Amino acid sequence: MNLLISVIQTPTFSLLLTVAAFVAGQWFYLRAGKPAWAQPFVTAFFLIVIVLLLLPLTYSRYQEGTVLLQQLLGTSTVALALPIYFHARRIRQYFLPLICTLLVSSALTVVVALLILKLFRVDSSVLISMATKSITTPIAIAVSEHMGGSGSLAAAFVMITGVLGAILGAPLMKMTGHHSAAAQGISFGVTAHALGTVRALEVDQETGAFSALAMGLNGLFTALLLPWVLPLFL
C-alpha cells in the first residue's frame, strides 16, 4: 500500500493522469459527434477532479507534477500563428475594423466584469483574477499573479469563460445572422480564447485564423489595459 501511495504521488503519475484524461475526453468528444458541451478539455477536467478526490493525491502535488505541461502551454499558443500566416491576405482586408473591434471588446470585457464584482464587494484577489477571464490561460495566469491575483483562480475563470463561449458561440452567431469567417472568428477568439479558437478551427481554417489573431491581440490589449483600469476598482 505504501508503495502504491508513493507511485501515485510521483510527478510521472500526475503527468500520465493528465494525458490519459485528455485522451479519454477526446475519445468521448469524437464518439458523441463533437458537441460543444463535450469539449475534451472539460471532460478531462472532471475526470482529474474525480481522481484527485478518490486518490491520496493533493492538488498541490498534482500541480507540481504537471509543470512540464504548463510550460508547453505557451508554446502551443504560439503555434496558432500558423493559421494566421496561411490566411494573412484575408486578415489584412479586415485589419482596421478588427483592431477597432478588439479595442472596444477588450475594454468592455474587463470593465463590465469589474463593475459587477465591485457591486457585490468581492475580495480584491478575486476581482483581479476575474479581470483576466477573457484572455488565454498562460497570459491570464501571468498577468493575474503579477497584479496580485491568484493564478489558479484566474485559470478557473478562463476555463469557465472558454467553455461557455464555445458552447454558446455558434448558436448566437446563427441567431444574429453572422456567418462570415471574420465575424465568427473574432467573436470566438475574444469571448472564448483558446477553447473558442479550437471550436472555430472546426468550422474552417479561415475562421480559426481570425479567432487565433483575435485571441492573441485581445490578450495583449487586456494586459496593457489592466494596470490603468484595475486601480479604479481596488
Image (cartoon, rainbow, N blue to C red):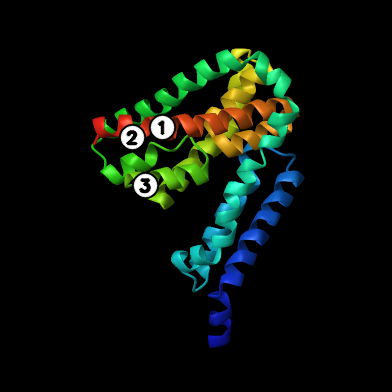
Q: Tag 2: Cα neighbours inside 10 Å, few (<14), some, or many (≥20)?
A: few
Vertical order, 18 against 55 (above or below) = above
Q: Residue drawn at (33%, 34%), measured in percent from left and top? A: 227
Residue 37 percent location from the top left of the image: 61, 39
Give the secondary structure at mark 1: helix
Give the secondary structure at mark 3: helix
Q: Amino acid at mark 1?
A: Leu
Q: Quadrant of residue 97?
A: top right
Q: CA distance from mark 1 to mark 2?
A: 7 Å
Q: Residue drawn at (44%, 47%), measured in percent from left and top? A: 142
Q: In this orientation, does residue 1 appear?
A: no
Residue 137 percent location from the top left of the image: 51, 44
Residue 8 percent location from the top left of the image: 56, 75
Q: Is residue 112 left or right of residue 80?
A: left
Give the secondary structure at mark 2: helix
Q: Quadrant of the C terminus?
A: top left
- Which residue is under mark 1? 224
Q: Nearer the viewer, residue 56 or 184?
A: 184
Q: Is residue 72 left or right of residue 124?
A: right
* Residue 207: numbered disc: none
Q: Are marks 1 and 2 in contact (CB under 8 Å)?
A: yes
Q: Amino acid at mark 3?
A: His
Q: Nearer the viewer, residue 154 or 212?
A: 212
- Which residue is under mark 3? 146
Q: CA distance from mark 3 to mark 1?
A: 13 Å
- Which residue is under mark 2? 227
For marks 3 and 2 on the same chain, the one whose residue lies earlier in the sequence: 3
Q: Amino acid at mark 2?
A: Pro
Q: Residue furthest bottom?
A: 2
